[in-house]
Image (cartoon, rainbow, N blue to C red):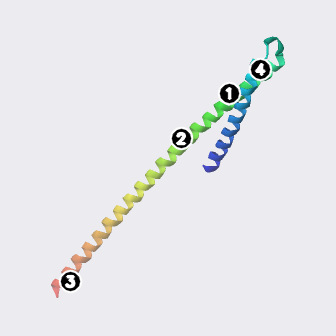
Amino acid sequence: FDDAQDAFERDLKEFKTDKALFTKATKTLDSKPPNKVSAREKQKHAAKKARLEEKSTSLESRRLEQLAARSRLTEERQRLEEEKNQAGLRIAKLTLERRSAQASTATAVSGEL
């Protein structure tokens, strides 16, 4: 789980860097007169935008998967804690029953003497 989190954070950082570069490229492109921007530049820019949107969607999907995994882990921990508590209560009850039985036996034996 930690490896997946590290990979996600690394990819998110890379995405933010790419987005900043894209924003800068957009500003540069927008500052040029429309007749000075070639069709190739527009096409390359549109392709970069599409890749960024794809990365964004992928990162969001991974983030949601991690949230679900974290939620499942939390639920599992709670379930295990509850089982541990129930087992502790059963052990305590059995211990009390055993001590009570021993006390009853001791009382019965001392009554026979």
Label 1 vs label 2, nearer the camera: 1
Label 1 is placed on what type of residue?
A: Glu
Q: Would you identify the image quadrant in which residue 86 lies? A: bottom left
- Tell me if label 2 and label 3 are in contact, CB under 8 Å: no
Q: Secondary structure at mark 2?
A: helix
- Tell me if label 4 and label 1 are in contact, CB under 8 Å: no
Figure quadrant of the C terminus = bottom left
Q: Count residues near mark 2 (Cα–Cα under 10 Å), then give few for <14, some for 14-19, many for 20+.
A: few
Q: Secondary structure at mark 4?
A: helix
Residue beneath label 1, please?
A: 53
Residue beneath label 2, please?
A: 68
Label 1 vs label 3, nearer the camera: 1
User: Which of the two labelled residues, at mark 4 and mark 2, occupies the earlier sequence position?
Assistant: 4
Residue beneath label 4, please?
A: 29
Q: Count residues near mark 3 (Cα–Cα under 10 Å), then give few for <14, some for 14-19, many for 20+.
A: few
Q: Is residue 70 above or below residue 24?
A: below
Identified at 61% across, 50% down, the residue is 2
Q: Position of residue 60 (x, y in %)?
A: 61, 34
Label 3 is placed on what type of residue?
A: Val
Identified at 79% across, 17% down, the residue is 32
Q: Nearer the viewer, residue 70 or 10?
A: 10
Label 4 is placed on what type of residue?
A: Leu
Residue beneath label 3, please?
A: 109
Identified at 40% across, 54% down, the residue is 82
Q: Position of residue 83 (x, y in %)?
A: 41, 56
Q: CA–CA distance between discs 4 and 2?
A: 40 Å
Label 4 vs label 2, nearer the camera: 4
